[in-house]
Image (cartoon, grey):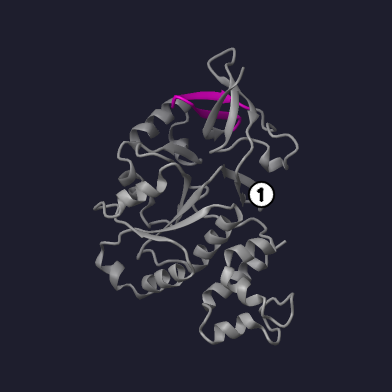
Amino acid sequence: MSDLARVVTRFGAELILRTADGALLRAVSRRNLAKGEPPHLRAPVCGDRVRYTAGDGAKAIATALEPRRNVLVRPDHRGRPTAGAANIDQVLIVIAAQPTPDWGMLDRYLTAIAALPAAPLLVLNKCDLPETASNPLLRATQSLYTGLGYPLLCVSALHGAGIDALRERLQGQTSLLVGQSGVGKSSLIRALDPALSVRVGELSAISGEGRHTTTVAHLYALASGGDLIDSPGVRDFAPYQPSADDLAAGFPEIAARARECRFHDCRHLAEPDCAVKDAVDAGRLAPTRLRSYHALARNCV
């Protein structure tokens, strides 16, 4: 008889599982646990739910992979698809006055999130700093993306402002944390759950991997409720070979205007009677969004 557990992290063929009662245990797994899937989706990853049985030794054996709600696929260093995390409910995109928000990166995040699909949440950290209120680019970022309907929450990891509201948004959810280096993701995690460092140490002891626990995806159970996935490998991601539907979901305002273009296959480049370009020229669409759209469209399948 098998039991159900969730994958906390993976080291090669070994897994750390979290059982129904919250205990952590080591397990082994075949790489092709999900037969019939493409090669990059056959092995369990962080966030997966698996069936396991007790092994002959100290390690359990993962025997089956439960159906996934979604799986984050990104290109590896050779451009090949690789799975990073699974069963994600929402993605927290952390921004701050410094470093300056990268609108192209934001648009890649939002398109990848729409493709999962998952719910996006923009988290403006360091909101109590004077440079946050006085930064014109940051104000423009807030205005643009909230105007497009994306939710935004202002917080201060240092002083605690907005942290309780963020905890509420995380309860009952599996959330992935992304953002540019330097926006305060690590400080935000500590503010959300000060005891998390203790659990990180416990995980290191169980895995025996020491420093390598900081270089792969991990799923942490927050004391206030919900699971948080943190990983250097998935903090910066783009949609892998996005489809036309992915682009439409990631840029809904462009998709809406595109229906008014003269040509149904308009690429919004140099075609005549392009409603999208006309809207940009008239100030009704952000030119940065169209540039991001074109950049992603070059990899469209």
Q: Residue 249: horizontal and vertical position, in percent?
A: 60, 63
Q: In this view, does 24 lie above or below 149?
A: above
Q: Position of residue 167 (x, y in %)?
A: 35, 46
- The image shows residue 238 at horizontal and vertical percentages of 58, 57
The answer to whether residue 101 is left or right of residue 4 is left
Neighbor class of circle 1 (other Cα within 10 Å; few <14, some 14-19, many 20+) is: some
Give the quadrant of the C terminus. bottom right
Query: Which quadrant would residue 254 be assigned to in this image?
Result: bottom right
Q: Which residue is drawn at 52% across and 75% down?
A: 288
The residue beneath circle 1 is: 81
SS class, disc 1: strand
Q: In which quarter of the image is the N terminus?
A: top right
Relative image position of residue 79 (x, y in whole percent): 66, 53
Q: What stretch is highlighted in magenta?
A: 12-29
Taking 10 as reference, is 255 above or below it?
below
Q: Residue at x 67, y 58 (%)?
A: 241
Residue type at mark 1 is Pro
